[in-house]
Amino acid sequence: MSEQFEPVIVGFTCNWCSYRAADAAGTARVKYAPNVRLIRLMCSGRLDPTFVMKALAGGADGVMISGCHPGDCHYIEQNYKALRRFLLLRRTLKGFGVEPERIKLIWASAAEGMRLAHEIDSFVEEVRKLGPLNWPTWKDDQHKAEPVMEVTA
Amino acid sequence: MSNKPKFAMYWAASCGGCEIAVLNIHEKILDVDANFDVVFWPVAMDAKYHDVEAMEDGSILLTLFNGGMRNDENEAIARLLRRKSKILVAFGSCATEGCIPGLANLSPVEELFDIAYHTVSTNNPHNIHPQTSFEVPEGTLTLPTMNPIVKTLAQVVDVDYYMPGCPPESHQIAAVIDLVIQVLQGKAQLPPKGSYIGAGNSTVCDECKRDRNVKTITAFKRIQEVAPVDPKLCILEQGVPCNGPATRSGCNARCPTVGAQCIGCYGPAEGVIDYGARLITAFASVVDAREPAEIEAILDGIPDPTGQFYRFNLADSLLRASTKAWKKNGH
Amino acid sequence: MSAEEKTPKEKIGVYVCHCGTNIAGMVDVVGVRDWAQEHLGKDGVVISRDYKFMCSSLGQELIEKDIKELGLTRVVVAACSPHLHEKTFRTAAERAGLNPYLTELVSIREQVSWVHTDKAVATEKSKSLVAGTVKRIVYNEALEKLKVPINPNTLVVGGGIAGIQAALEIANGGFHVYLVEREPSIGGHMAQFDKTFPTLDCSACILTPRMVEAGTHPNITLLTWSEVMNVSGYIGSFNVTIKKKARFVNEELCTGCGICMEKCPLKVIDDVYEAGLGFRKVIYTPFAQAVPKYPVLDKPNCTYFKNGKCKACEKFCPTNAIDFNQQDETLNVEVGNIILATGYDLFDAGKVTNYGYGRLANVFTSMEFERLCNASGPTNGEITLRDGKTKPESVGIIHCVGSRDKNFNNYCSTICCMQSLKFAHIVKERTGANVYEFYIDMRTAAKSYDEFYQRILEEGTLFVRGKVAEVTDAARNPGEEGKLIIQVEDTLAGKQRRIPVDMVVLSSGIEPRADAKQTGKLFGISCSSDGWYIERHPKLDPVTTMTEGILIAGCASGPKDIPSSVSQGAAAAARVLDKILQKEVELEPIRASVDEAKCSGCRICNNLCPFNAISFIDDLAVTRINPALCQGCGTCVAACPAGAINGTGFSNEQIFAQIDGILMAV
Amino acid sequence: MTQRISIDPITRLEGHGKIDIFLDDKGDVANSYFQIPELRGFERFCVGRPVEEMPLLTNRICGVCPEAHHMAAAKAADAVYHVDPPRTAKMLRELLYMAFYATDHTTHFYALGGPDFIMGPDAPVAERNILGVIHKVGLEIGGKVIQMRKYGHTVVEMIGGRKVHPCTSIPGGITKILSEDERKQIEEMGRWAIDFALFTIQAFKDIVLANKTYLDLIVGDVYTHRTYYMGLVDANNKVNFYDGKVRVVDPDGKEFCKYEAKDYLNHIEERVEPWTYLKFPYLKNVGWKGFTDGKDSGVYMATPLSRLNASDGMATPKAQAAYEEFYATLGGKPVHQRLAIHWARLVELLYAAEHWVELATDPEITSPNVHKVPTEIPTEGVGIVEAPRGTLTHHYTTDERGVLTKVNLIVGTTNNYAPIQMSTNKAARSLIKGGNVNEGLLNMVEMAFRAYDPCFGCATHSLPGQMPLEITIRNPDGEIVDVLKQFVE
């Protein structure tokens, strides 16, 4: 493997447009950077900023959020909520010293496998430039007692 | 020594408000005295560190521990009391989530010094900073070592229960003391380990008497721009970023009741693992705009999102500290 | 203590597919298999296998066997995209007695082997994706599909040809239909046309029988002069509130003899049916063949209502059917499905100011022209200029008015080319005038359309290819006086032309209904950026929407000619019949639900659901989610500041665990 | 050979204060160091926050006197926005503050300082606590003390929203509008508080002043330091807790300077020592001359006694009478004996109660006009109030959005850090001779210490009345030679 830094990126896709775009890229054998690992949600509106925090805290160097183009949301208008959360999340992460470029929002329709692939490639390059984030794992931690961890929203 | 169960209360890096809140239960204090043998409670009585060390492990039934983990001494006592106590309660915001002093995690310790010992009123031409060990003519003086970041009690030792609030409301403290006494008398059961006690499972809105409507926010405002707020209407709907929707109930919505926004001192609701994220998503969800430019313009109404959303919870959030803070400290 | 030390809750089987060489060619399948076995044991993986083709019957049997013999409680298949084979493997697991929602697919083909080039890296990525899904699936719940009964009644909104067709199909199928139309008569735009392309048969002649059939069908309740006010409920059981506007005519007594219309002393311009060219009485039916036959009294214009005198209609009505005290009435109907055939609005040609409509008397809109040449129209089919007598010697027909024009509508209105050709034929036939067609592209794609085009060419109509810049009456050259001059760049000849004519017909495009958005909100469906309703799938599912139980037909989803509108009406009806015959529908159990003990009633989520699934219970001060209306997007789950909303299938625990998994060191 | 004695307030082991005494070869005190081993860095992490949050954030500096920080922050924020809150808003803030003062002074007198006198310095240590006090002067007093604290907290909660960490003061005023019903209750409680204050002063006179030994103790030399004194005064140079100018008098009682909050930097400077986390403020125009008193040393004191010394009297009649009696008894201004702080505190208690009623009966107190929306661009501002433990200064600089770019805080007790270091040092020197550690040392040092009611970091209150100390005497090899304990086990 190459010497250069290979960022680890967690990607969230909606079930209808962006995940299908990834399928399309596959079917068309479009080659793109292997650094992004996708997690499928039903809609970009499901994207809870907690997911992004968890990914960064868990060692991701960047996070990609993707959904249907504005106006084309499978659920009518939920991707606008994703957009708003993304913008506020990015502002908040600035305060943590996380470069805004590490979080990217990408719109891709089910047909845009090529586009998704290109976006991923350029995102990986951006994050590569920023270098590793490797958030500390806080080894000193005693975890909170199990029951609390397991009651979740 | 009496054979009453042993009780201890301790303050680590804290403001003392938790102690005052306990004293504010007034005559209830006597119940504690009647049912417990208070073996360690700096604010209320004398006892010695090595007396505690001398105790058998697990010989203290109940320890209410407040204050955050700001330096190595805080941690040392946390470990000691964990060892000695059957039930260790993280008491108050500092111990449960880091509280306001946790905001220090946004900057490296060095910066705390650089600022504190070079303020406008400080005359420090030789750039003197306190030293953990310093030779005076007569000998060596030592000071505790600051942690690179503020930690919560649970990040240092295993915690049995959490009692949130800055400080916990006295009526809640009284209630918890009643519960424990009832348990001692076999009239009640302890909640499962890890439970939050002396607080509700919902959020502040649950206890807030203000009228609420379907929410859409066209502009965020600062409290001084709108005060006095409409006495009836939800403060958030008046544009003031009130943390009530995401903040654990239990305080009777004190601040909104007197026309001030909730600042979140009771921390996240049951089971939430990142308090700030709940506010980010909630506030963003009700912003009434679709174009990035419009959205950004509305978000400009929150000048300090990180502080707004993690005011009390930073040290217990998923990220816990800014890159500046931990990178500098070579994590 | 951390999850690792606990004994695993579930018994998980991992199955890695070679997909021939599709996957195995780029991913070390055996490596992935062994890694899962070795490193994911603590998460509950008890067996990890690889197989050439997991989706083959043998592959599926492998899984079923393990479920039975090893007592697997979860199945993870690393193969192709879930959109391809999720169902396959879930069904297989179900055969072996495992709830289908306890099986998950990991896409290591579309997302790995087909798109990456370095085998080591691809293998590594596959491992982490598998790890993610293994950790996630521990938190999967056994879900049951929601079953809701289907009320056999259907609501059809819009009495145009698409709506009529849909209503008839269902009614003939033996089920009841409420057909709601806001005009006094059904028939829609088609009823206004004279002839229909390309066959040139008389519009009324083919439409009327259908209208009558719909009007008299025992299974159809016709509700004209009526509008839907409110819709609640969900597929299978909608509750619809309909306002029946007062006609001031008692339908029980009225025989439709028409005497009231004769006797009514007051005429007003008919902007709707006659496109403003003709007149109608104040008590009227829009046209002779109107269905139902009962007239409507136009209250704002009625002399009696204005100054308390007249009542001519009442005096002469032989059956005392006139009722000045009639009030609007609202009725509630329960239906299982709703078909929206709300049609289109005509583009307002006046907006294209340089074509002079409204300023230059002899510029006509296509609808005006339809009325002009309609035998039952204001001129009894005589094609004349505005003065009502002069026959035009030359007519210019301009295409794409308001269509394919970034100033107005970008889309092609589909029907204008053929409509214009039809006009050209009629003009020639009736007046022998010279006809010019100004077009950008000639679009005559459907069956026997192009033949019609050829025919018109042969008839001697002159075609000028180019977008008309201007229509003016400012004469510059000899021969232009008193004419309308059409300024156009002839892109074939490559030169500017000024063509003087007597009459100009603007072939206006068609637009979404002005109130399409409100209507969409009322029924919980959405419009695309240009305002047409969005289909569930533009190709494979054109007559259903994202909202279960709400279907669309005809021009509601975009410009269509009559044949397509009719087939869409029929298609929508077929879908409805299918649902009715199933008696109940199964809904995906991916749903959100509120933990009312945790809900603080902050109402953050109340505005977030476009499907109206979220409602606030005032007296309890909590929010509830209607599972049948919920589409499972999870937006409210992500929004709840109290973490009080849970989303099945994509719960926080599941996603958190998956994040941990894919970030696991491999 | 040097011996080292550490006096370790064991109950504050995580370190709000620790005294190290070094003895020389002769066994006399070579030097002593009072260390504050904690820093939380508010000056750093408040930067970046919106200025209106300061009354909420800085509360958390001290849970014992959050009201003081709340007020100083609110006033500084007003100044940052160049806005003058409506009269009612200012009165409500001050009313809250009076109730807090009455509570805090009560707590200190009965639970912390009082026992030294009421029980007598030579009484068995175990009895010198609030329980002992109640025992001696009767149970009903115990009840009254609790009642007083309850009333105080009730008022704080009514106006401030919460018993601890009030939340209602904002730039331009306050968010709370007082109802007539609430006003009535507050007035009644205030009247009760006046009686309680008078009663307390009487008790002090009967028990302490009537007793020659106690009186000598107060006027004795061990606790005397001739320093500068600082306090906030109103237009007539009367003591004021919430507003006015800072006045400093020299050791002879002459006015040394009088400045407005915004000018504090011309008068105050802070020194950093490498062996403690807390800074030492001093008078800039006199300069730092080390831990020594007298006219040439910039060391000053800011306590109830200082406020009385720095003023020309009290603004309410009964308190003024008590003020005059105070100086008549102690031989005129200024009073340098530290133990007189206890008495001075009671004079202030009476003033707080009287002013409480004055404010509660002002016709405008229930006016809804409690806030003025700031219109100016925020820039910079200083807010000063008198915390029970000394002059409290908040100084903020913000950007044009009112987001903090600079924060400077000089906390009440900090003012007295040098004097306390001196007092404990002096007590040690006078009581440790030739290596003999006088048994009374602990008690005397403790009394010296406690008179200031120190509130380090900023919470060193100790109930019931004990600053429990232990002295460990080690030889140079660190072996324990002797351990002196305050409490008989």
Image (spheres, rainbow, N blue to C red):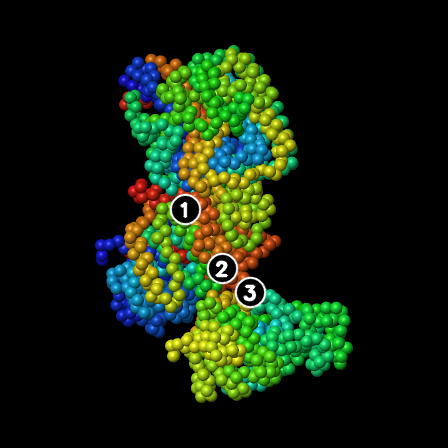
Circle 1 residue: B317
- Disc 2 marks a residue whose amino acid type is Ala
Q: Position of residue D316 (x, y in %)?
A: 59, 22
Indicate the quadrant containing the C terminus of chain D: top left, top right, bottom left or bottom right. Answer: top left
Residue found 38% across the figure and 59% down from its top = A106
Closest to the camera, between mark 1 and mark 3, is 3
Q: Chain of mark 3?
A: C
Circle 2 residue: C592
Q: Position of residue C654 (x, y in %)?
A: 41, 57
Q: CA distance from mark 1 to mark 3?
A: 43 Å
Residue found 46% across the figure and 67% down from its top = C407
Q: Residues within 10 Å of mark 2 (few under 14, many from 20)?
A: many
Q: Position of residue B110 (x, y in %)?
A: 33, 36
Q: Secondary structure at mark 1?
A: loop
Indicate the quadrant containing the N terminus of chain D: top left, top right, bottom left or bottom right. Answer: top left
Circle 3 residue: C518
Q: Secondary structure at mark 2?
A: strand
Q: Badges 2 and 3: C-beta atoms under 8 Å apart?
A: no
Q: Chain of mark 1?
A: B
Q: Is residue B115 left or right of residue B18?
A: left
Closest to the camera, between mark 2 and mark 3, is 3
Are dots 2 and 3 on a single chain? yes
**Above-or-below relation of C145 to B163:** below
- Disc 3 marks a residue whose amino acid type is Gln
